[in-house]
Image (cartoon, rainbow, N blue to C red):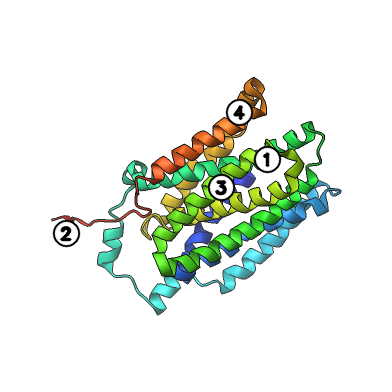
């Protein structure tokens, strides 16, 4: 499982960099959302294969993806090709971009701000996929409807968040629109999350809404993280943000299980309210969403 996760994670960063190369900021949000719909759509069709052996599914899907990757390799447009044919990058610009090192990335308030808010989105996804079904089963409610509508809402949330960002960018600017919509989706995500563990009789409606705002929030903050660094370090910045955010999924595992065993499922209300306050507080600082490189010549 660790090997599967590592390969999946390694493929995501170059995919987002390639999308950023093909499209400008105005259309990047929509195309990024289309890319993000892949995992959500896969989650929707998985129940269709419940009767099949999981190793067979993994092997067959892996073969199909390998063949598809070989086909893409032949016709895919790379960043180097675009630079040669359309917009060659000046040597001075490349030297300026390379002034950002790993140490500067790790100390950047931009990186930590995005990663911490993104952390809550990843945490919520694990909660909805793991603890919400267990809670519904404990309350003698079927979790199948919740899970299907969660994935359906996730597909809608991923696409709509990208489309709304594209519309807002023309009116508010790219970064202000991303910050505003990211905060809205994240806060509403946790409010709806409180409802899941309070009003289980409305699990179907709440499942759709939770999926909508959880995946919409993940899409927005992952999008922000993919463009937080300059081109030369965009992959490193995106990978580091994703690494920190993935700790949210780890926290939603054993550490949260201990809290649930101690305080029961009521702990979610306290947890989500605390996180809402934290998100609003850190967002009020108006920390930039992009790192900037400053060459020594400019500094002097």
Mark nearer the N terminus (2 vs 1): 1
Q: Nearer the viewer, mark 2 or mark 3?
A: 3
Which label was assigned to residue 297? 2
Whether 88 is drawn above or below 55: the answer is: below
- Judged left or right of residue 253, residue 86 is left
Could you say whether the residue bearing mark 1 is in a helix, strand or loop?
A: helix
Could you say whether the residue bearing mark 4 is in a helix, strand or loop?
A: helix
Label 3 vs label 4: CA separation? 18 Å
Disc 1 packing (10 Å; few <14; some 14–19; many ≥20) = many
Looking at the image, which residue sits at the far bottom? 85
Task: Tell me the residue at 59%/49% (across/down).
Answer: 214
Label 1 vs label 4: CA separation? 13 Å
Residue 196 position within the rendered picture, expressed as x and y whole percent measured from the top left: 68, 40
Which label was assigned to residue 267? 4
Label 2 vs label 3: CA separation? 45 Å
1 and 4 marks in contact (CB < 8 Å): no
2 and 3 marks in contact (CB < 8 Å): no
Q: Nearer the viewer, residue 297 or 157?
A: 157
Residue 244 position within the rendered picture, expressed as x and y whole percent measured from the top left: 48, 41
3 and 1 marks in contact (CB < 8 Å): no
Mark nearer the N terminus (3 vs 4): 3
Label 3 vs label 1: CA separation? 12 Å
Disc 2 packing (10 Å; few <14; some 14–19; many ≥20) = few
Task: Tell me the residue at 44%/60% (across/down).
Answer: 177
């Amino acid at each position: 499982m660790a090997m599967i996760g590592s390969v999946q994670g390694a493929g995501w960063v170059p995919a987002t960099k390639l999308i950023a190369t093909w499209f400008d900021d105005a259309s990047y949000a929509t195309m990024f959302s289309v890319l993000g719909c892949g995992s959500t759509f896969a989650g929707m069709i998985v129940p269709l294969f419940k009767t099949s052996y999981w190793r067979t599914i993994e092997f067959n899907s892996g073969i199909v993806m390998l063949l598809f990757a070989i086909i893409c390799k032949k016709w895919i447009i790379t960043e180097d090709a675009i630079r040669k044919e359309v917009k060659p990058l000046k040597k001075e610009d490349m030297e300026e971009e390379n002034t950002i090192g790993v140490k500067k990335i790790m100390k950047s308030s931009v990186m930590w701000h995005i990663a911490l808010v993104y952390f809550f989105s990843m945490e919520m996804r694990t909660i909805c996929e793991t603890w919400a079904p267990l809670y519904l089963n404990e309350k003698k409610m079927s979790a199948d409807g919740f899970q299907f509508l969660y994935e359906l809402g996730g597909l809608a949330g991923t696409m709509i968040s990208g489309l709304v960002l594209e519309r807002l960018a023309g009116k508010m600017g790219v970064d202000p629109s991303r910050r505003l919509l990211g905060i809205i989706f994240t806060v509403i995500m946790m409010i709806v999350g409180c409802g899941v563990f309070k009003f289980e009789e409305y699990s179907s409606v709440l499942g759709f809404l939770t999926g909508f705002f959880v995946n919409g929030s993940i899409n927005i903050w992952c999008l922000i993280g993919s463009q937080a660094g300059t081109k030369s370090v965009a992959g490193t910045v995106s990978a580091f943000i994703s690494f920190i955010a993935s700790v949210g999924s780890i926290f939603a595992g054993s550490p949260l299980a201990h809290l649930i065993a101690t305080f029961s499922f009521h702990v979610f209300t306290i947890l989500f309210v605390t996180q809402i306050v934290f998100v609003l507080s850190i967002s009020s600082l108006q920390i930039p969403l992009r790192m900037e490189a400053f060459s020594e010549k400019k500094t002097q």
